[in-house]
Image: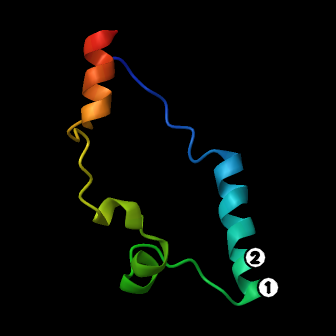
């Protein structure tokens, strides 16, 4: 439980990805904007705004069919 865990630093793939992201941001002139009010409004899941009824009452025809089954 109290054994030594070596730290080899950040993974080379992660370092390369961060560098590529900086280059892409400079080329496009567009930076990521996470968790800002503008991005929240643009990308939010609007289906979560609706209060769905997941247990609706069945129609009379369906109740009759289920009783006959």
Q: Classify residue 62 as left or right of residue 44.
A: left
- Residue at 40% of width from left, 76% of height from top? 40
The disc label shown at residue 60, or none: none
Q: Position of residue 22 (x, y in %)?
A: 68, 75
Q: Are marks 1 and 2 in contact (CB under 8 Å)?
A: yes
> Which of 46/57 is in front?
57
Label 1 element class: helix
Mark 1, residue position: 27
In this rendering, the count of numbered labels is 2
Q: Classify residue 32 as left or right of residue 19.
A: left
Residue 29 in the image: above or below residue 43? below
Q: Quarter holding the C terminus?
A: top left
Q: Classify residue 12 as left or right of residue 1.
A: right
Q: Position of residue 30 (x, y in %)?
A: 66, 86
> Which of 32/20 is in front?
32
Q: Position of residue 53 (x, y in %)?
A: 23, 48
Residue 43 in the image: above or below residue 37? above
The answer to whether any part of residue 56 appears in the image is yes
Q: Quadrant of residue 55?
A: top left
- Residue at 76% of width from left, 86% of height from top? 28
The disc label shown at residue 24, or none: 2
> Which of 28/55 is in front?
55
Report crowding for label 1: few under 14, some 14 to 19, many 20 or more residues within 10 A (C-alpha).
few
Q: Quadrant of residue 61?
A: top left
Q: Which residue occupies the extreme right position in the image?
A: 27
Q: Quarter holding the N terminus?
A: top left
Residue 13 in the image: above or below residue 7? below
Q: Which residue occupies the extreme bottom position in the image?
A: 29
Q: Position of residue 64 (x, y in %)?
A: 27, 22
Q: How is the image coloured?
A: rainbow
């Amino acid at each position: 439980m109290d054994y030594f865990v070596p730290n080899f630093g950040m993974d080379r793939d992660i370092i390369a990805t961060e560098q590529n992201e900086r280059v892409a941001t400079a080329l496009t002139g567009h930076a990521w904007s996470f968790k800002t009010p503008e991005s929240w409004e643009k990308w939010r899941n609007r289906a979560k705004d609706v209060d769905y009824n997941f247990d609706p009452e069945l129609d009379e025809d369906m109740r009759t069919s289920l009783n006959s089954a």
